[in-house]
Image (cartoon, rainbow, N blue to C red):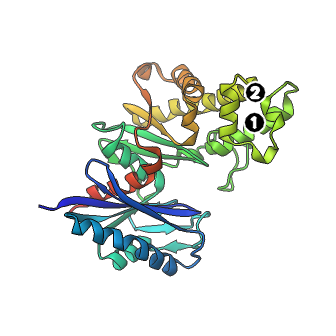
Amino acid sequence: MKQPLAVGIDIGGTNTTFGIVDRRGNLLCDGHISTRDHQEVSFFIQALHEQLAPLIHKVSLEGGEVKGIGVGVPNGNYFKGTIEFAPNLPWRGVVPLASLIQEAFTLPTVLTNDANAAAIGEMTYGAARGMKDFIMITLGTGLGSGIVVNGQLVYGHDGFAGELGHVIVFPEGRLCGCGRKGCLETYVSATGIVRTMHELLQSRHVHSLLRDVKPEEITSKTIRDAALQGDALAIEAFEFTGKILGQQLANFVAFSSPEAIILFGGLTKAGDLIFRPTIHAMEENLLQIYKNKIKVLPSELKENDAAILGASALVWEIKS
């Protein structure tokens, strides 16, 4: 009997990564192509096929059977299999990507946005195994989220539910890439903490290791490194970021009462620097009925493989 396998494809604005995964979440082989270099989607599909098809052929010769393809992509619509008006991708408008990939590979293909894919990956392979109610928060360049209720991902009527990064936390606050002001991700994300750090450096006339770093070279990593060396302003940036995140997690708990909130992404590498103020602020702002019930956990997905694992997990949801 052939081993069931799944293809996971993660499409980002710069690069696309892909791999073939078994039921246990082991990545058997992988590869990547440039997204940015393919301004026409037909050329992108062609390049993807040239790199991925040999991998599918290889695993089939070794006793595997690829059951389908899962795709995680910004602005992905699960119901329609389309990418819709993604600002950071080279293809404009509405792109029927799932059907194009399915046609090229003659394999069932399902698509969703990248944060939803991460949630399904966590439920299949990671910290949310066995959980039926949890919220996945991805803290990368922006803030993505996937909401699982009664074991089902919440998509909403149009496929775009769960945009928690665009909850407005400060009316007339920072300008967001979505065109509105004060969205959560402008404060709680790798980009957000950098903006906070710049504001602190300008408003506080105290020593900081980051004053010796060129402004354009300040990143969430350099802030983390400075904080770990005891830099007071860098620590304050994490405290501010965690406080805002925790306050909003308390609000999110109120509408779905999750067993856990799972945090994933580059910002979580800071460990207690971000988790401690987040959990403190969440507990401080929770309704009494929720206090000390909600776990805040780091993702258990392997960071380098997480996007592929999340997308591949979509395949196991396909009804044969």
Whole-percent x and y of residue 214? 82, 44
Whole-percent x, y for residue 45 in the image = 45, 76
The foreground one among 59 and 284 is 59
Residue drawn at 65 percent across, 56 percent down: 178
**Picture layout, residue 226 above or below residue 306:** above
The quarter of the rendered structure image containing the C terminus is bottom left
Please tell me the numbered disc located at residue 197: 1
Callout 2–callout 1 Cβ contact below 8 Å: yes
Q: Is residue 305 left or right of residue 125?
A: right
Amino acid of disc 1: Met
For the image, the number of numbered tags is 2
Q: Which residue is mark 2?
A: 233
Identify the residue at the far left of this view: 1
- Amino acid of disc 2: Leu
At mark 1, the secondary structure is helix
Q: Is residue 160 above or below residue 274?
A: below
At 55% from the left and 35% from the top, the residue drawn is: 269
The quadrant holding residue 315 is bottom left
Q: Is residue 94 above or below residue 176?
A: below
Q: Examine the image and state in which quarter residue 36 appears.
A: bottom right
Q: Position of residue 86 (x, y in %)?
A: 57, 64
* Left or right of 272, for residue 136: left
How busy is the neighbourhood of tag 1: few (under 14 within 10 Å), some, or many (20 plus)? many
